[in-house]
Amino acid sequence: MKQIIKSSFFQLLVIYVILVALVSFELLFKYTLHFEIFAVLLGLFALVLTKEKEVKINKLWLILPLILILVIRILPYLNNSVPLGYDPGIYKYAFEGFTDNWVYLTFPLGFLTLIGVLKNIFTIEQLLIPFFMFITLLLGFMIYATAKRFFNENVAILSTIVYSLSIVQFKVFSYFYYKNSIALILILLAFYLIEINSLLFIPVAAFLGGFHRPTFLIFGLTFLMYTLINKNKVKNIIYGCSILLLTIPFYLSNFKELILNQIEPLVTANIGAGTFITFFQYQFSTLIYLPFALIGFIYLIKEKKFNLIFLSTLILLVIVYFQLVFFNRFLVHLDIFLIILAGYGFYLILQNNKRLGLILIGLLIISGVFISLKQDKTPLISEEELEIISTLENNSYVLVTDSRYSPWVLGYSKSKTIAPGLFDYNIWDYEEWTKFWNAKPEESVEMLKVFEKPLYIFIGRNQRQNLNTFNSTCFNKVLEQNRTYIYRFEC
């Protein structure tokens, strides 16, 4: 009976892989079928899989993910020097050592400390693009090391291949989630050190706490669950207390703003989803490896191996599925752990049917490469716009009428940036900004008199442009170039 079920499983798996390939090559619309239900059903078949024989994967396979990680991330910069994503200007501003109040609220002391060290080795331009590429490569290495320690080298190789094909992880790169990426390296390193019984995990976890609070939350919840099911409860409690004590110094200067002010939204469930794709979009972005991750997850339940990888995945699934806190952004973390479990799932398939497994993995790799190369690699603003921004008068006040351009003006103009809902110099609420966006010239003149001078207004080409607002002698048009405008407020 079990053999019949296993045979049916492989038949369904073949159908699934073929359908995913058709979706990848745009021969089938991905929302036509409920692939997520298909993936769950395939995951449940893990209960009938067995570890029949060991399968050795050649280490040369590691060359493939190494090439893919680098190539996919280098391609956007072949004919472009503008960093991808929305945040590069904000990071550039922080890298340059500005000490505005919002900088300390946005970038924890751990991050600023690390950047302070790295600035002695790299230029700011190197930190923005090539070093961030290196971070994504280092994360791939950490996935390999972690998967090898918790499972075996074969699983590690397969997990690294999956990581190199992950659309979600490319989005993390293209959205410029710098802190997030480094934090993922730190949490995997901490788990690795725990698994090898090294007390070095204590300072690593403490630094993670001072570096990225959301990732530290996942570490803390995972370590708590790990302690509850572990025999060495007393030791782990002592270790946990030690981590908290070492983390506190990172927040002494801004404890109220960074810690206490975050408690109320958590208690009242009034915290945002986070700026990332939705859980629905995530499911259809991971079709290549989702069922294999579920196979790995369910097989760990079958084996009763509730290790740190399993516990983290479980916690993240609960947070994301039930939309508890910052749930969309936690998809970034969930994806990393599902990638590791997908490597385990792929390996279980190879153990049960090596020949068919290799064929299916090969087809999925081809599909994944095709999808990865098709991802949008266009920066949010053009090189021309960035050059225009850099011509703005240093130390002046610049009002940005669209938040799309706010980080770029902040980081590349060296001006005091006034932007909707951002930074220290904004004194308008949403209603006042709405009024300004729709104001007549005489109204806008009166509204702008509250700001210090010299005051410029920047209007980019890719935003709503109500130029009638500036049809007054109080606005001197100092630049008009390819639908990009700079006005100087003279009254």
Image: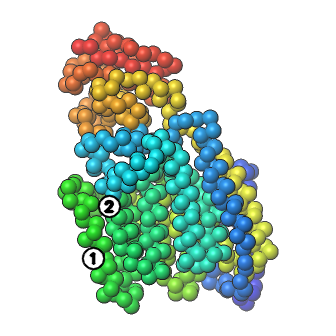
Residue beneath disc 2:
210
Q: Crowdedness of circle 1 by 10 Å Cα count: few (<14), some, many (20+)?
A: few
What x and y, as percent, mark residue 157?
65, 69
Residue at (73, 80) in percent of width and height: 55
Residue at (24, 63) in percent of width and height: 249
Indicate whether 427 appears above or below 184: above
Q: Residue furthest front?
A: 120
Answer with left or right where residue 387 lies relative to residue 476: right
**Which sits in the foreground, 107 or 300?**
107
Residue at (26, 34) in percent of width and height: 426
The circle drawn on residue 385 is none
What x and y, as percent, mark residue 402?
39, 32
Asked which quadrant contains residue 222, the reply is bottom left
Indicate whether 300 appears above or below 365: below
Residue beneath disc 1:
241
Asked which quadrant contains residue 298, the reply is bottom right
What x and y, as percent, mark residue 256?
19, 57
Q: Looking at the rendering, in which quadrant would you find the N terminus?
A: bottom right
Q: Crowdedness of circle 2 by 10 Å Cα count: few (<14), some, many (20+)?
A: many
Indicate whether 393 appears above or below 271: above
For the residue labelled by badge 1, is the local secondary structure a helix, a strand or a loop? helix
Q: Name the amino acid type tagged 2.
A: Gly
Answer with left or right where residue 161 lies relative to residue 212: right
